[in-house]
Image (tube, rainbow, N blue to C red):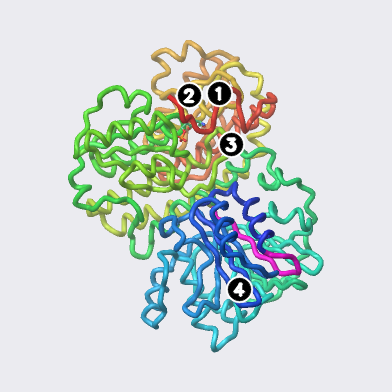
Amino acid sequence: MCGIIGYAGERDVVPLLIEGLRKLEYRGYDSAGIAVVTKNGLEIRRAEGKLGNLEARLLTEPVSGNFGIGHTRWATHGKPSENNAHPHRDCSGRIVVIHNGIIENFIALKKRLADAGHTFRTDTDTEVVAHLVESHLAALGFVDAVRATLREIEGHYALVIIDADEPGTIVAARNGPPLVVGKGVGENIIASDVTPLLQYTRDIIYFEDGEYAVVTKDEVELFDRDDKPVAREPKRITWDAVMAEKEGYRHYMLKEIHEQPRAVRDTFTGRMFEESGEVFFNDLAMTPAEWSKIRRIHIVACGTSWHSGLVGKFLLEQASRIPVEVDYGSEYRYRDPIVDDTTLVIGVTQSGETADTIAGMQEAKAKGAKLLTICNAIGSAATRLAHGVIYTNAGPEIGVASTKAFTTQLTAFYLLSLYVRQLRGESKESIREAMHELATIPHKLEDVLEKEKEIEELAYKYSKAQDFLFLGRGLHYPIALEGALKLKEISYIHAEGYPAGEMKHGPIALIDENMPIVGIATKTSFYDKVVSNFQEARARDGKLIVICDEGDEAMRAMADDVIEVPHTIEALQPILTVVPMQLLAYYIALRRGCDVDQPRNLAKSVTVE
Ligand code: AGP
């Protein structure tokens, strides 16, 4: 996720912008830049890589002033580079923009503006905003030109825009990614979140979606999407800086569980276009002709990422009718896999640095495979090793227990399966329907997150158990495995995930009144079979916690406890059913006094064998 900061006041703005961007580093980035209005006019300094590179640039090419904006970029459109780093300008260099999010209709806007004579310098979606403001400037003046621009762009964005000819005035707009203003005395500071503001002020004005503000050093004028003034009192923030990075959540893991609606949306936005019924990946690096040569697919991963690979297998086999194998990196790298140039190998890794997964990918590449990675870390080893990359755009995942990375990996696999269905000539109407269902998932995730309180109570009820069994069938078997891993890695309770149909082949011997069983029984093609598996467990006095569809009376009657989730198509249900398990594990671990964000013996990225 990009970092944004903007300042109007009396201070020396450059150190303030750099310090503010440093406080936003935890959001992850691949380049950075600032724009400052100096006595000689507007100056821009940008650099690829870490903030230190930008500071080095400022040492050799210093600028100073007391009005400016700064940005750390997490690339979505356009590779990480100095040229694609924000801020971006219009043709005249007068209008300067920084942005977090995705302008979904930038391709059409860019064509229209280029046809009207605008010259573009970058591959980014953001640059379109600067040229759009420029196109209205002569007729409307700066602030109204931004108003007109906000009415034309679609997508989700946090935008900060300045005009070199109107130093001291910042226009900032929010539609999706967060944006706040720190209200000071004789100064005002805009940022992506409160973290960089707390050393200057604790009086924070939060933007709501669709709102924008005209900010000077003395004024913050807030407006709604219909340009009506909004009166909003600043909130007094009492957090310390660390709590601010967690946005007030007690742990990073809980914050990241709650970020999943935004993370899933950021993973599909800009990659599926419902009007045209088309799926589009920036960096797949495979032509349709190369796809047609593929005769087998191997998915290589570890831990939670391996679980998403099991879901990916279902989706890709259904879409492509090509056999898909899923392997642990630690096994794959030594089993001399059967691989040649008709094999596609997909390395799934949040960190992009997991040694076993990287080694498996290297083994495959050496044998001539086409290599793709589904990864959350821009510029990581996996993304440099693979031919093609699908970024999960989840933003940095700090908690050791992986949550938003998992649901965005599932989203990436779903999109990839749509892409394959598109290559195989499936009708645009059917692809469009599948896209529409995915577009409803962020709201349905919000509905699931509203069950947090009841899940917390369930967690306390079962927190003393010494063993758990997680059961699921089909696409939910990997979710049962994932639920068991979440619980064991942060609460240290022994937990096993099993295919529900396998119980009678052994695990049923474990079941008694002390054994909680977490099962998934959403409405799928095998619902009835799952119900009978759960009845077998009940007959042995197992305590049954079932994740089911909203309004499932039969499950309410049969289970000891139910957690109801909104209905969706079978292929997307895992994105919803995993969240109650994440929350259950979190609150059980909390109850047991465990270190949720840094569980014992574990690392966030296992970079050794
Ligand atoms: C999951 O909660 C664990 N932290 C762990 O299993 C993790 O998924 C695994 O180490 C793989 O990490 P990666 O996705 O960064 O490759």
On screen, residue 341 versus residue 400, left or right, reads: left
Question: Which one is closest to the eye, mark 1 or mark 3?
Answer: 3
Q: Mark 2 and 3 residues: CB-CB less than 8 Å, in contact?
A: no
Q: Name the residue under label 3.
A: 399
Q: Mark 1 and 2 residues: CB-CB less than 8 Å, in contact?
A: no
Q: What stretch is highlighted in magenta?
A: 1-13
Could you tell me if residue 80 is visible in this image?
Answer: yes
* Above or below, comparing residue 213 to residue 81 in the picture: below
439 vs 358, nearest the viewer: 358
Question: Which one is closest to the eye, mark 2 or mark 4?
Answer: 4
Circle 3 packing at 10 Å, graded few (<14), some (14-19), many (20+), is many
- Give the residue type at disc 1: Lys
Task: Please report the residue visible at 71 percent of the width from the left and 65 percent of the height from the top.
Answer: 12
Label 3, secondary structure: give it: loop
Q: Mark 1 points at which residue?
A: 488
Task: Find out whether residue 6 is within the magenta segment.
Answer: yes
Task: Please report the residue visible at 29 percent of the width from the left and 59 percent of the height from the top.
Answer: 428
Instruction: Determine whether the beta carbon of the residue marked 2 sits less than 8 angstroms from the nearest atom of ligand 1.
Output: no
Circle 2 packing at 10 Å, graded few (<14), some (14-19), many (20+), is many
In the rendered image, the quadrant that contains the C terminus is top left
Q: Name the residue under label 4.
A: 162
Label 4, secondary structure: give it: strand
Q: Which of marks 2 and 4 is nearer the N terminus?
A: 4
On screen, residue 421 versus residue 228, left or right, reads: left
5 vs 576, nearest the viewer: 5
